[in-house]
Amino acid sequence: MSDNLMDRRTFLAGAVALAGTAALAGPGWTLGEKPEKPTSLELPPLPYRENALEPYLSANTLSLHYGKHHAGYVARTQKAIQGTSLESQPLEAIIAHAAAAPDSLALFQNAAQAWNHNFLWKSMKPGGGGKPPEGSALAMAMDAAFGGFENFADQFAQAANGQFGSGWAWLVADAGVLSVVTTSNADTPLTRNQTPLLTLDVWEHAYYLDYQNRRAEYVQNFLNHLANWTFAAENLAGG
Ligand code: MN3
């Protein structure tokens, strides 16, 4: 069995277990905002203006990445679930369903990419980057797991730069213990029952207009100037 299939089966087991409980927040993800009022899948607004991350990411990059790539994943997911029982489901449930269905690879890829990009925009902010606040729960968890912020940053950069081809670098928590992981293509830590705290998209479409082949410079600017530690801390507290 491939690791990927194993991940999907593990995720399905988790999703089924969750569906049977009254608790709607699982380890690592929330099963929709309000279960009694299902929301239809849509493209969330960017949390800042398209030029807000300049000079590290240009308005041109954000316009294409959000307006074309992200919007495309959402549109293809919407089309695939139209008229099916998944139509009124939260995105996490659609991902869980598609991850477990052998004939739903395209739906899985589009739905997971829609989720990953929702998470990506919140993982960055103007004036971000650097260390999380000294003495914060996030900083302490980082010290415990990596032996300090610098070691975390090195590990994250190595993972992001070393991801072969398209994919994602993530800071995740597993039972409160932090680690850096990568996923390929559309894969997401949701299928591994890990709590995503922060992510960086290392698909070429995320940086090529601004950095061409210099992925390492893109990754370093994310760490130094864009990483949204407030968002990561919220995810750690919620997970
Ligand atoms: Mn992308």
Image (cartoon, rainbow, N blue to C red):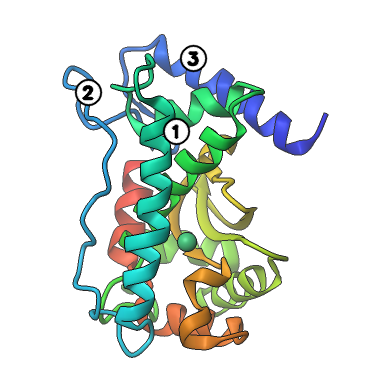
Disc 1 residue: CB within 8 Å of ligand 1: no
Instruction: Work out whether 228 lies above or below 8.
Output: below
Q: Nearer the viewer, residue 22 or 169?
A: 169
Which quadrant is home to the N terminus?
top right
Q: Hey, what amino acid is under mark 2? A: Pro
Which quadrant is home to the C terminus?
top left
Q: Is residue 132 visible?
A: no
Give the SS element for disc 1: loop
Q: CA distance from mark 2 to mark 3?
A: 20 Å
**In the rendered structure, which disc, 2 or 3, sits on the residue that comes first in sequence?**
3
Q: Hey, what amino acid is under mark 3? A: Ala
Q: Hey, what amino acid is under mark 1? A: Pro
Q: Position of residue 102 (x, y in %)?
A: 66, 23
Q: Nearer the viewer, residue 89 or 225?
A: 89
Q: Is 137 left or right of 147, judged from the image as shown?
A: left
Q: Which mark is residue 10?
A: none
Quadrant of the image occupied by residue 7: top right
Quadrant of the image occupied by residue 167: bottom right
**In the rendered structure, which disc, 3 or 1, sits on the residue that comes first in sequence?**
3
Residue hosting label 3: 17
Check whether the beta carbons of the residues at disc 1 and disc 2 lie within 8 A of each other: no
Q: Is 228 left or right of 177, judged from the image as shown?
A: left
Residue hosting label 1: 27
Dot in front, 2 or 3: 2
Instruction: Work out whether 48 lies above or below 78.
Output: below
Q: Position of residue 232 (x, y in %)?
A: 36, 58
Residue placed at 44% from the left, 38% from the top? 28
Q: How many numbered circles does the render carry?
A: 3
Residue hosting label 2: 38
Residue placed at 39% from the left, 33% from the top? 79
Instruction: Work out whether 141 lies above or below 59.
Output: above
